Image (spheres, coloured by chain):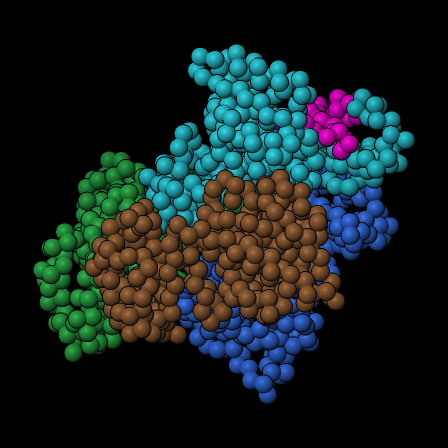
Chain colours: A green, B brown, C cyan, D blue
Amino acid sequence: MENNGNTAILKIHCPDRSGIVARVTDFINLHHGNIISVDQHVDHGDNLFSMRVSWDLTEFNLPREEIASTFQKFLGEPYNMKWTLNFTDEIPRMAIFVSRASHCLYDLLARYQSGEFRVEIPVIIGNHTTLEPVAKQFGIKFVHVPITAETKAEQEKLELEILKEHDVDFVVLARYMQVLSQDFINHYPENVINIHHSFLPAFAGAKPYHAAHKRGVKIIGATSHYVTSDLDAGPIIEQDINRITHHDSIKTLIQKGKDIEKIVLSRAVKAHIEHKTLVYKNRTIIFN
Amino acid sequence: MENNGNTAILKIHCPDRSGIVARVTDFINLHHGNIISVDQHVDHGDNLFSMRVSWDLTEFNLPREEIASTFQKFLGEPYNMKWTLNFTDEIPRMAIFVSRASHCLYDLLARYQSGEFRVEIPVIIGNHTTLEPVAKQFGIKFVHVPITAETKAEQEKLELEILKEHDVDFVVLARYMQVLSQDFINHYPENVINIHHSFLPAFAGAKPYHAAHKRGVKIIGATSHYVTSDLDAGPIIEQDINRITHHDSIKTLIQKGKDIEKIVLSRAVKAHIEHKTLVYKNRTIIFN
Amino acid sequence: MENNGNTAILKIHCPDRSGIVARVTDFINLHHGNIISVDQHVDHGDNLFSMRVSWDLTEFNLPREEIASTFQKFLGEPYNMKWTLNFTDEIPRMAIFVSRASHCLYDLLARYQSGEFRVEIPVIIGNHTTLEPVAKQFGIKFVHVPITAETKAEQEKLELEILKEHDVDFVVLARYMQVLSQDFINHYPENVINIHHSFLPAFAGAKPYHAAHKRGVKIIGATSHYVTSDLDAGPIIEQDINRITHHDSIKTLIQKGKDIEKIVLSRAVKAHIEHKTLVYKNRTIIFN
Amino acid sequence: MENNGNTAILKIHCPDRSGIVARVTDFINLHHGNIISVDQHVDHGDNLFSMRVSWDLTEFNLPREEIASTFQKFLGEPYNMKWTLNFTDEIPRMAIFVSRASHCLYDLLARYQSGEFRVEIPVIIGNHTTLEPVAKQFGIKFVHVPITAETKAEQEKLELEILKEHDVDFVVLARYMQVLSQDFINHYPENVINIHHSFLPAFAGAKPYHAAHKRGVKIIGATSHYVTSDLDAGPIIEQDINRITHHDSIKTLIQKGKDIEKIVLSRAVKAHIEHKTLVYKNRTIIFN
């Protein structure tokens, strides 16, 4: 029995109508699924229903390959749902893009290696070689893909090939200092996660700590978001902040900021891995 | 039509079984209730299901006086539920107990007067007269009930009479510096809300800021909880904190603490008024 | 002896040179002043020294009226200092400008009335009459100065007259929904304090909570700053934030935001009253 | 010239008297030291003065080996100071003690390897071998020193020998699950740093997340402190917190707690390395 000990995770969004939660949980109960968690949200302004439900498949009496089609027929179609179905024995494959800053990379790799992230990391791509030793240290393949304005198009093509070759599901930009083209992003919609080193929408763009220092803010932050064609304007997954004072120089801002960046990015990556994020209208719902 | 524009709020907890959310939302849908919000939680460790659901009664086709009995018959009884049903046109009546510190009282009364709290405040009871002018300023009756070790039993009886006379549903201890007897608490189970000026369980008891200063903590906090017979050990509704430094004296700790206390207490009171709290096993669930 | 029980507060900034702290504290010690607090900061990037020192005047052997001239001669002049000298028996006089939102006004007045703010509040000016009852309740004069695009210039003149008449030292905009003219601000440089209901520089301008909701941020904030001619761009005194989720509507953002706004504004006002703020290069130093 | 590009850091505490800051900065100026930072604090309750001052030694005209004796003669002795003098070219040597949990170790080693910590780490000691691969990965010697109740005394002796052999200045307990004896601590007074996985003094002792879950707190925390003979009661260096909800199980508390623990521990270690901590009366002063 293939489902043994495995869990299904269903994410749904659709126009709000009464009774959707009941219909979905009925569907699962009817087939002897043991519901583990349900979280739902209705945006009344947008009349949008969204839901994440997970259930134990041990005694579920629909064969796994029929779940999707059955669900679509009885619920997806009638309720005009957009939905995704995942199983916890399908380990997502994540690539990390880096430049020179190491703090986010270390944090991601430590969580990966200690088993906190249920993920595979087949490859790390860097536009510099600075972090190749870190990748090696954690036993992960590192590919150097230098990028200049002239080579960008072809190098992105190369990157896409590397990702395809390694069967990558999603990409994490761990302080990767290159802007991805629209074409690249189109290959991984809602599957490229960035960390921006400011509390967006404040200080979008380059050198946010310099800008924060100049503006004299009393709090700095970091923002993890899905990458869209609009730079630093994609759907926000997670943000956090830290208090600063007039004693802080740009140097100490950068230092303090690193701690926020790595935690915020890792929380966002974890939510993504666990299928707890849902994007709509350039915002996210983060399920429990 | 009595239900016009009114909302029903149902809070449930019971042993977890599959399908409860479906049954409850079906019940509401069946009677043409328009669900406004659903929040549910399952504690798998305790196998406990809990849920808060609110719905618009405008087109609900059960007369209000039959909702409770019908629900009990079809769902409450079969699922062994503990549940409460409230309607938003029933404005809860809240009494405030005070001693000398004014900050929480001001904050509660400002929210009350500006309409943030959907509540009636028929009476403020003080064991000192210090805050009588504040009560007067906001046009609320103030009763002075001094308490000594000797007079405590009879004075609590007096307080209970005052509460009864004013038809009080719940009591807020706004930095009230007297310990209530078990007998008093028994009259208002899960309906007496206290603010303790520390991050419980740290610094329970008297003079927590002195204790915090002596211990050299780097963060202070405040805790709002339901009062039980076990001092400072009741179910926590809300907590918050503020960073401090070695520059802080006991005096500035007290000052900074006041801001946390009043916000934490007011958040807890708001959650209570809106029927968003549920107590079990000396913990709380705070619904969305 | 006029100085009895009184404290002097000196704030200095000047080009950094070695030995300034020593010179200043020597000056105070030499005249038998008992130093209560010293806080200093050097911005090495800007080569700027700043310092706040307070001392007990009980045994200070310079007559109060000679302190300024003596200090200027021996230290201010030679070190090219900008400095201010205040005495704690000079209670600053603060006017509050309001529109319709009451939360900041209540918070300021409660602190004033309970003695937390060492300040006089001779007058509250509103461009609406909504909050006149609140002013009355706290026994403070309220003047209605309605403003339209056409009447703005003359009405500001009227406001300035009212402030002059009441000998006002500084103005607090407690969610006052009018932009002050450059001319008005020039009358109170670094003495008009605003609260903006966002985490600046994010969401400057109108309706920040609507903008925050649309952008899908996970944290909201508030910013108190000195008003300059550049809207929402003045030197920031204090900021704070609160976490939100996708469950939050614009309505609940506004509600949660109020708690941050009032605390942030009151902290800023307190720092200003206690002469703990120093502005330079559109930033602030907030002394201990 | 041996002092080239080097910085001296002086930490002082003594009974408060007027003019100490002036005397100390005069001393440095007199010998042509260029002051980089000064931070001072007076605890008026305890009449205790404390200060940290750092200065560039490039043009300092006292030979390094005479600084201490000269300072002691002219200032330390007369003012009854306790003081320490450090130079930034003396890299402190830190040992890490671990058991099985890896998150703090990874965080410390990533900072070490990326150059954030100006420190040497000659050895990691584990009472389990679980983390030996992590030590190896970062190229650091790992010594397995298993400990049982029976072997504790002799094994601690072994640990002390290892520390001595590696010339260790201070020890970091990175979730080391053994209580150190008084004798061990006596070898490294104010030089053993622990991370406790709760907001002390709440939930001292074993299994704090289990206790926090049972108590139903709304916020969890972590505390880094110097180890003293009184378990979990030493001087607190740093604390931080994270909000939780009723959705959190013990498992997710532990997970969320790890992020706080590692950041809090690393901040404390950084403060220690940079000679920014000063202990008195079981509290700490953390200088800027």
Residue drawn at (45%, 66%) of the image: B279
Asked which quadrant contains residue C192, the reply is: top right
From the viewer's side, name the closer residue of D55 and B219.
B219
Which span is picked out in magenta? Answer: C70-95
Q: Is residue C84 magenta?
A: yes
Q: Position of residue A228 (x, y in %)?
A: 26, 42
Q: Is residue C37 magenta?
A: no
Residue drawn at (36%, 57%) of the image: B9
From the viewer's side, name the closer residue of A205 and B253.
B253
Residue drawn at (31%, 68%) of the image: B72
Going by the picture, which residue comes out furthest to the bottom?
Answer: D150
Q: Is residue C39 above or below residue B61?
A: above
Asked which quadrant contains residue B215, the reply is: bottom right
Q: Position of residue A74 (x, y in %)?
A: 11, 61
**Image quadrant containing the C terminus of chain C:** top right
Q: Is residue A31 visible?
A: yes
Is A227 positioned to the left or the right of D145 in the image? left
From the viewer's side, name the closer residue of D53 and B176.
B176
